[in-house]
Image (cartoon, rainbow, N blue to C red):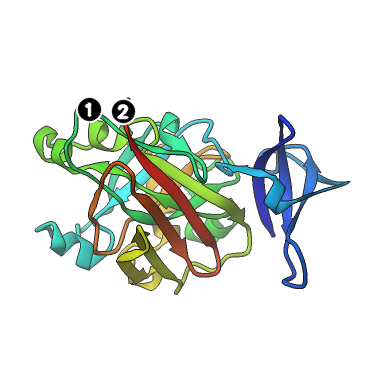
């Protein structure tokens, strides 16, 4: 099941994406919040083309992300894959949805894209055993871990470089049945291919990352885990359009704009 969060005629809704390939895709409106409660499909449909898709979830608590989880990406920045997951946090205020602009901050002269698989947490989770990891995951979506690479190098830690408003595009929807074991993951900027890999190349798998996090801090419904990026990260400039894609999951497109 694919669940979207969208705006239609000035109202915010959740909806199930109904796209059987035989006609125009539609959104079946839902009553309730699908991540924290029981949902009920309503007898109301909206053509997908008439809806404005939003970030499918705004984390109530946190975005937990991981660096150097693909060996080729670690090497392209002169690093090795760490022995233990390399964890950092992004604020929930960095999250934006499809078609919303990535805003280039004045403090940075070198902002880069990083396509990533995002895990959406569906239950309160603390010290999760391996046998329960799948049960904690609500679904998956596509993310772009936008990074001010020059600030990352200067600061020596990643909070500022990863934390600007608009630095976590997310969407287009959550897929509750997606299989993350081997899916093509890619990024295009202005239709030019920048990144391509497979989720099978992750050093630490999503379940391992979830177990690792929950041994340190409590995960809450709606929290996100960003699982790292493949090789090919590169710069974003004013006027660019960046498209990040995961096969079987969807495509997320955002324009890039400088601060005015």
Q: Would you name the residue on which mark 2 appears?
A: 259
Point out the residue furthest to the right here: 43
Q: Nearer the viewer, residue 120 or 257?
A: 257
Give residue 109's quadrant in the image.
top left
Residue 35: name its quadrant. top right
Say left or right for 14 vs 148. right
Identify the element where label 2 is drawn.
loop
The answer to which image quadrant residue 26 occupies is: bottom right
Seen at 14% across and 64% down, the residue is 75
* Residue 200 coordinates in the image, percent (x, y): 38, 72
**Residue 52 appears left or right of 71:** right
Q: Position of residue 209 (x, y in %)?
A: 39, 54
* Label 1 to label 2: alpha-carbon separation: 7 Å
Q: Residue furthest top?
A: 260
Give the x, y percent position of residue 119: 49, 52
Q: Specify few, some or many for label 1: CA neighbours under 10 Å numbering under 14, 14-19, or 20 or more.
A: few
Whether tag 1 and tag 2 are in contact, CB under 8 A, the answer is: yes
User: Label 1's element?
Assistant: loop
> Residue 74, relative to residue 145: is it above or below?
below
| Picture quarter with the N terminus | bottom right
Q: Position of residue 233 (x, y in %)?
A: 24, 57
Lower sequence index among marks 1 and 2: 1
Q: Nearer the viewer, residue 215 or 111?
A: 111
Callout 2: few (<14), some (14-19), or many (20+) C-alpha neighbours within 10 Å?
few
Q: Is residue 22 left or right of residue 114?
A: right
Q: Which residue is mark 1?
A: 106
Quick one: 39 or 20, which is closer to the camera?
Answer: 20
The answer to whether any part of residue 17 appears in the image is: yes
State the residue at coordinates (37%, 63%): 191
């Amino acid at each position: 099941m694919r669940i979207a969060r969208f705006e239609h005629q000035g109202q915010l809704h959740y909806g199930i994406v109904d796209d059987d390939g035989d006609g125009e895709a539609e959104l079946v409106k839902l009553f309730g919040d699908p991540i924290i409660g029981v949902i009920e499909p309503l007898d109301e449909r909206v053509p997908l083309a008439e809806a404005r898709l939003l970030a499918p979830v705004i984390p109530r608590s946190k975005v937990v992300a991981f660096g150097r989880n693909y060996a080729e990406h670690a090497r392209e920045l002169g690093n090795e894959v760490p022995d233990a997951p390399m964890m950092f946090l992004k604020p929930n205020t960095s999250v934006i949805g499809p078609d919303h602009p990535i805003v280039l901050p004045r403090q940075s002269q070198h902002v880069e894209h990083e396509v990533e698989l995002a895990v959406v947490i569906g239950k309160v989770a603390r010290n999760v055993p391996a046998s329960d990891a799948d049960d904690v995951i609500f679904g998956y979506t596509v993310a772009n871990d936008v990074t001010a690479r020059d600030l990352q190098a200067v600061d020596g830690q990643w909070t500022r470089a990863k934390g600007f408003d608009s630095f976590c595009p997310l969407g287009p929807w959550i897929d509750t049945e997606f299989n993350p074991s081997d899916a093509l993951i890619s990024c295009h900027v202005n239709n030019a291919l920048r990144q391509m890999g497979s989720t099978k190349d992750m050093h630490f798998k999503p379940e391992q990352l979830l177990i690792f996090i929950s041994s340190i801090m409590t995960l809450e419904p709606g929290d996100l885990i960003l699982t790292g990026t493949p090789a090919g990260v590169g710069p974003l400039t004013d006027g660019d359009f960046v498209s990040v894609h995961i096969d079987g999951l969807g495509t997320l497109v955002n324009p890039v704009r400088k601060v005015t």
